[in-house]
Image: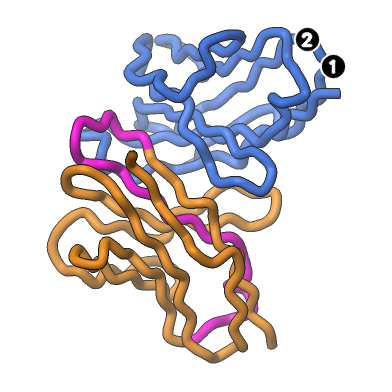
Amino acid sequence: NAGVMQNPRHLVRRRGQEARLRCSPMKGHSHVYWYRQLPEEGLKFMVYLQKENIIDESGMPKERFSAEFPKEGPSILRIQQVVRGDSAAYFCASSPPGTGITDTQYFGPGTRLTVL
Amino acid sequence: AQSVAQPEDQVNVAEGNPLTVKCTYSVSGNPYLFWYVQYPNRGLQFLLKYITGDNLVKGSYGFEAEFNKSQTSFHLKKPSALVSDSALYFCAVSPGSGNTGKLIFGQGTTLQVKP
């Protein structure tokens, strides 16, 4: 049973370019969460999605960031016009259908974004 | 504001000795508490969680944690540390009141176990 998959594992972008981060949840999981880990800091929640729905985007920056979880395919976190401050590790987590607040979230290996 | 605090940036312990990694929280409603471990350049691995019931929770790799409601704490413990336990440990809470399921993480504690 494969775990949460994220790709790419490492992504280098120049300022102003777009970054697309992909996350495939564990089999049978329908909830996806995105978190960002800045250097020397803990993880900060960004967005929570279910298939074709954004449930909670209270942690998403207002501009340049968007996320989707289509009916088919992986969840995508998109960062437009990247800036150096976007450099971080971005982690995706998934959980099975359920109440959400008590379900265990299983994390992927992360995508490390470097903005030059 | 809802938050999680891990008061120690680093904990050093000798192999074979007991270890404790501290965590306190501040949330409204019933807290659901989690511990994760992160090895270098890896994702987070789930260790254990407290939802309800017995205050002492047992998890993976011999770890356990004790929920203390009066002290709003959820310290991680292990009776005998291994060198391979050296990693970054995160405490997290899912606030029970009005929450959609997001986790609030502490800043992490580096555990160093020396032979």
Report the residue that reaches farthest toward the bottom.
B16
User: Do residues under tags 2 and 1 come within 8 Å of each other at their CB atoms?
Assistant: yes
Q: Indicate the amino acid at tag 2.
A: Gln
Q: Quadrant of residue B87?
A: bottom right
Q: Quadrant of the C terminus of chain A?
A: top right
SS category of the residue bearing label 2: loop
SS category of the residue bearing label 1: loop
Rendered residue at 85%/16% (across/down)? A14
Judge from the rendering whether residue A110 lies leftward or rightward of residue A46; answer left or right. Answer: right
Give percent across and percent down for residue B12: 62, 79
Stretch of the chain drawn in magenta: B80-102
Residue wearing tag 1: A14
Rendered residue at 70%/49% (across/down)? B41
**Chain (orange):** B
Q: 10 Å neighbourhood of mark 1: few (<14), some, or many (≥20)?
A: some
Cα separation between marks 2 and 1? 6 Å
Q: Which hue belongs to chain A?
A: blue
Residue wearing tag 2: A17
Query: Is residue A110 or residue B20 the one in the foreground?
Result: B20
Q: Indicate the amino acid at tag 1.
A: Arg
Q: Is residue A106 above or below residue B83?
A: above
Judge from the rendering whether residue A100 lies leftward or rightward of residue B46; answer left or right. Answer: left
In the image, residue B101 lies in the stretch drawn in magenta: yes
